[in-house]
Amino acid sequence: MDPGLRRVVISDRLHPQQRLEPSLLQIITNRPDDVRAFAAEPGRTMVCKPVASPVLIEDGQLKSVYTQRLRPSDLEDLAGIDTTAHLFQAWVDKDHEVRLTVVGERMFAATIHAGSDAAHDDWRSDYGELTYSTTAVPEHVAAGMRRLMDRLQLRYGAADFIVGPDGWTFLEVNPCGQWDWIQGNTGLPIAEAIADELQGVS
């Protein structure tokens, strides 16, 4: 495992003879048995979140699907799981989160502090209860992100981290993640960095 991005392990659909490693932090699967095995880790609380866009149309209405913390009763009926891929993550205790926007070789880190229970589970669900500040990126995290961006051949990415008792925990990186609201709330010069990157300015 890359020491710069610790605890980052993703499992896709498993073959029947494979077993989930207890250290996994997230799985993407459409097999109910995988979900049950992932949930069986002692003391584990887990969440389910959309793999793609969190917006859908149901009964003619536009709805948003946010990260949901799952209860044991939610696992009793997993009908429908096999219809498509689902993303499950282990719940990680947190003080706050960080949106790390990477543009070329530059990194812009903003803390996101949740002021409500809903925002604590998923800050997208309650923007009005969020506060922001800029923060420094630990060198081992920055080094790990550079290696990840190189491996994925990305020049832009919006990465999300949880910051808690165990330090920074990587969740995911979005190659088309939003950035304007971060710049508006923190003053981080992300737009200028994107313009420089597009023009080949170092």
Image (spheres, rainbow, N blue to C red):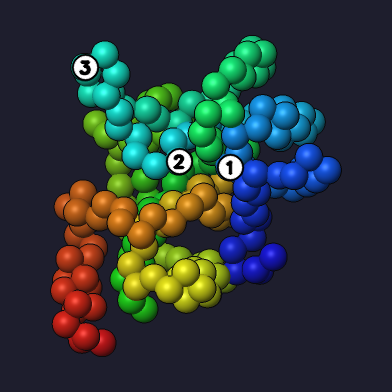
Q: Residue at the spot x=60%, y=34% of the render?
A: 30
Viewer-nearest residue: 20 or 168: 20
Residue 39: give x, y in percent of width and height. Answer: 70, 30
Q: Residue at the spot x=30%, y=28% of the render?
A: 56
Direction from residue 98 to residue 177 in the image, left or right: left
* Distance between the alpha carbons at the discs numbered 3 and 1: 28 Å
- Whether residue 91 appears in this view of the structure is no
Per the image, label 2 sits on a secondary structure element best described as: loop
Direction from residue 131 to residue 47 in the image, left or right: right
Residue tagged 1: 28
Viewer-nearest residue: 114 or 58: 58
Identify the amino acid type marked 3: Gly
Q: Earlier in the sequence, mark 2 or mark 1?
A: 1
Numbered label attached to residue 51 = 2
Viewer-nearest residue: 195 or 88: 88
Identify the amino acid type marked 2: Val
Q: Earlier in the sequence, mark 3 or mark 2?
A: 2
Contact (Cβ within 8 Å) of mark 3 with mark 1: no
Per the image, label 3 sits on a secondary structure element best described as: loop
Q: How many marks?
A: 3
Q: Residue at the spot x=39%, y=30% of the render?
A: 66
> Up-down: is 59 above or below 126?
above
Residue 147: give x, y in percent of width and height. Answer: 52, 74
* Distance between the alpha carbons at the discs numbered 2 and 1: 8 Å
Residue 142: give x, y in percent of width and height. Answer: 49, 71
Residue tagged 3: 60
Q: Earlier in the sequence, mark 3 or mark 1?
A: 1
Quarter of image, res 18: top right
Numbered label attached to residue 182 = none
